[in-house]
Amino acid sequence: MVSFDLSDDQRMISETVKKFALNEMRAIYRDCDEKGTIPPEFVSKAWELFLIPNNIPEAYGGVGEPRSVVTSTIIAEELAYGDFSLAVCALAPATVVYPLIEFGTEEQKQKYLPMFCEEQFKAAAAALMEPRIDFDLPSMKTTAALKGSEYVINGEKCLVPLAADAQVILVYAQTDASAGAKGVQAFLVDKGTAGMELGEREKNMGIKALDTRKVTFKDCRVPKANRLGGDAGCDTAKLINYTYIGLAAMATGVSKAAFEYARDYAKEREAFGEPIASRQAIAFMLAEMAIEVDATRLLAWEAAWRLDKGLDCDREAYLAKQYAAEKVLMITDRAVQILGGHGYIREHPVELWLRNGRGFATFEGLVTA
Amino acid sequence: MKIIVLVKQVPDTETKVQVKPGEKAISTDGVTFVINPYDEYAIEEALRIKEAKGGDVTLISAGWDKAAEALRTGLAMGADKAVHLNDPAFLGGDAHSTAVALAKAIKKMEYDLILCGKQAIDYDNHQVGVRVAELLGIPHVAVVTKLELQDGKAVAHREVEGGSEIVETPLPAVITAQKGLNEPRYASLKGIMQAKKKPLEAKKPADVDAAPNEVGQAGAKTTVLTMTMPPERAAGRVVEGEPEDAAKQVVKLLREEAKVI
C-alpha cells in the first residue's frame, strides 16, 4: 500500500530545508534577481546542509546515506519554495554526482566524488539542452564519436547553469544515431578541456540570478574512460526521468510560494468593504490553485516513489513534469492576477515567480531529483 | 566541559493559536511543533563552547512523546545525547513543577554549565531556567546576549534598559539565552543521519527520584481556570472634517464615549 507519512529523517530534512529556504533564500532572492548574481556566502551556507554529500558513499568521503528520490523531491520542492534560481545553483552539482553514484565506474567515482565531499562548494552541471525548438533524445544533435582511445564531441548546448565555474560538466551526446535514445550517452568533461568553449552569459526572461551559458564543443576530445559508466555506459532515459521529477518538484515549490502569497494577500486586501478573498471570482481561483499545487506534488511523489521501488517510471515522470510545467504557469499567472496592479510591480514577488515559472515548459536537465 | 541544555518543544511561531471552548490549553490540531527558538540559541551556544573548549552537550526536555522530535533535531544540530522526561506524570505542569522535574533529573547528572532559552514562546513564563538554578542551589544570569567562559567563571552580558550589564558568576550556573547571543545553525543532513545513532534516553519519575505528586499537574503551584481567545478588535472609527473640528470631535468622543480622558 501507499503511505504519505514522512519518515523521521524526511520530516527533519524537510523542516531544516524549509527553514533554510525561508530564512536564507527569501531574504536575498529579490536582490539576486535584480543584480543577476548569487552571493558566494549563500552557496557556502547551502553547502553546509550536506544536501548532496549526504548520498555519496562513505568510501569517497560522503555521509553514505542511500539515495531516496522521494527525499530528493521533498528537498527540491522546499528549496524552490525559497527561490528557484538559488535552488538550481545549490543543487547543480547533483546533476553530475547522482549519475556518477548510479552509473559511474569505480575509477570515475574515485576521481570525481571526493571533490564533492569537501568543505567548499564545487560547481558542476549537466549540459543537456540544445538551442533548438524541441527536446527529444533520439534527435540530439551533439555527437560523440569514438576515435581510438578518445571520444570527440561536437555540438552546441544551452542553458548550462554555473558553466563558467563548473569543475566538470556532464555532457549528453549521441554516440550512435541508429540506436536512437539509447545511443545518447553522458561524458565527463573537465573544466578547461580544449574544444569546449563557453558562450556569453544567457539573457533569460526569468532565473535572472542564475548564470547560464551556451557551451559549444568543437572537436572536444575526452579520454574514452570519461564516458559515464565506461564501456557499459549509462541509462540516459532513466537519468532524464530523475531530471523530470526534479523539475516537477521545483515547479511545485514555485507554485506553492505563489499560491500562498496570493491567498494571504486576498485575505488581507479589502475592496468594497470586505477582503477580496470573500469574492467568488477570487476564491474560486485560489481553490483551484490549491488543488493544482497538491496535484503536481502528488504526481512528482508517485514518480519518485516508483524509482525508489525500482519500478519503471518513464510515463509517471513525464506526466509529472508536463503537468507541473503547465500548472506552475497557471498558478503564478493567477497570483499576478489576484494581486491586480500590485502583481505587475517588482515590490511584490509574484511577477518574479511568473517569469521563473514560465521556464518550466522549456527547462530540461537543469536539476535532478 | 559538561553542558546541559533545557529544551522545550513549542508550536511553530507561524501557528495560528486556537483554543477550543471549554479547553484549558491551546489546541494542538494541525499544529507543527519546533524547538523553542530561544532554546535554539542555548543549543547553539553550547555547541560553540564545546567546539572551542571540548566537552559534551546533553539536552533535556520534559514533555509528551512528540517532544522527542525536538530532542532529535537538537541532536542533529550537534548535541551528543538527550534525556526525555516522558511519562504522563510529567505532563500538565506549570513552571514550578516542570523545573522540579528537570532539576531532579539534572541532580543525577554531571554538569559545569546549564543553558536554556530566556522564555518559551508558548506560555511565556520566563521562569523554568531561573527556577532550575534555585532548586539546584546555583547562580543564574538571565536574558544573556554574550557569554564568555574563563577559569571556572562565566562572564555574561545582558541587555538592560539604556545599556548593558556585565555579570560575572562562578560555575556551574544557569544562563538563559536572549536573541542576539548567536545565530543558530541548521541541522545538516549529515547531522540528521548522525543523530539517529545518538542516545536519547526516556525517563520516568522514579528514574529521577521524583514522587509522581511533585511533578506535572499534581505538583503544579498554579491552576489554569479558563483559557479563551482574546476578543476580536472592533474596527476603528474615522472622524472626518477639517482638522480643527475633527480634533474637537475626537476629544469629545474620548471623554464621553471612551471615557479615557
Image: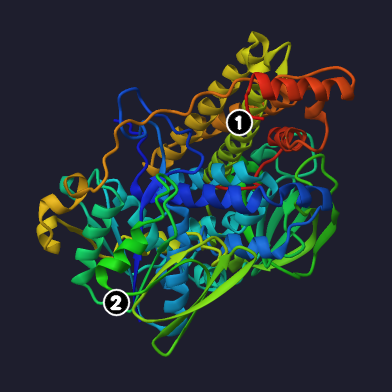
Give the secondary structure at mark 2. Answer: loop
Which chain does the numbered disc 2 sit on? Answer: B
Q: Is residue B261 above or below residue A229?
A: above
The answer to whether residue B71 is above or below residue A59 is above
Q: Which residue is mark 2?
A: B111
Q: Amino acid at mark 1?
A: Glu
Residue A227 seen = no
Sort mark 1 into few (<14), some (14-19) or many (20+) by Cα contacts within 10 Å.
Answer: some
Q: How far apart, in angstroms, are the residues tagged by discs 1 and 2? A: 46 Å
Which mark is on residue A260?
Answer: 1
Instruction: Say if mark 1 contacts mark 2, CB within 8 Å.
Output: no
The residue most toward the bottom is: B151
Compared across the picture, whether A58 is left or right of A299 comes to: left
Q: Residue A338's spot in the image, x, y percent?
A: 72, 21
In the rendered image, residues at marks 1 and 2 fall on the same chain = no
Query: Residue at left 39%, top 60%?
Result: B74
User: Percent x, y for residue B154?
Assistant: 44, 81
Can residue A324 be seen by looking at this rendering? yes
Instruction: For mark 1, name the chain.
Output: A
Q: Quadrant of residue A227?
A: bottom right
Q: Residues within 10 Å of mark 2 (few under 14, many from 20)?
A: some
Instruction: Identify the element where label 1 is drawn.
Output: helix
